[in-house]
Amino acid sequence: MKEVISVKTLTVALGDRSYPIYLGEGILDRLPTLLVEASIRGAAIVVTDANVGPLYGERVASLLGSGTAVCALPAARNRNGLTGSNGCVGVSSKRGSIAAA
């Protein structure tokens, strides 16, 4: 396990739908603990791209628990919006969870 040097937390303020974003080196192994601390639970889908997915997708899915799906979008240099995410939304609706990219 990589040592956590520092963690910065940003909060996306959406009222009762607010959620944290954690930034820092070495925090991936702490993902299950961070989700519990943030009271985030339930089904999950890892939305990634073709560059990052092969590096971290399955590892993150295994940390989130059995049944977690990984949906990789095509890699794009100057992506604006969710172009190409329709496949992830389809997977999401079948699993009863919400995906965001």
Image: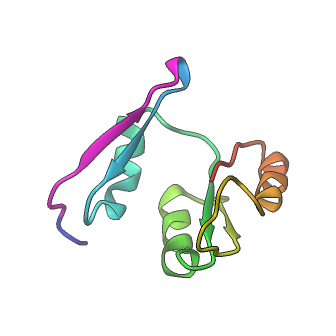
Name the side, left or right, on which 2 lies relative to 61.
left
Name the side, left or right, on which 40 lies relative to 5.
right
Display colour scheme: rainbow
Asked whether 19 falls inside the magenta stretch, the response is: no
Front residue of 81/27: it is 81
Counting the numbered discs, the total is 0
> What's the residue at 62%, 50% (across, down)?
44
Percent coordinates x, y for residue 83 in the rendering: 76, 59
Name the side, left or right, on which 28 lies relative to 4.
right
Percent coordinates x, y for residue 62 in the rendering: 52, 66
Tell me: residue 48, above or below residue 75.
above
Front residue of 47/66: it is 47
Name the side, left or right, on which 85 lies relative to 7.
right
> What's the residue at 79%, 52% (across, down)?
89
Front residue of 84/71: it is 84
> What's the residue at 35%, 45% (across, down)?
34
Percent coordinates x, y for residue 46 in the rendering: 60, 59
Percent coordinates x, y for residue 63 in the rendering: 47, 61
> What's the residue at 67%, 59% (across, down)?
67
Tell me: residue 7, above or below residue 68.
above
Start-end of magenta stretch: 4-15
Q: Quadrant of the N terminus?
A: bottom left
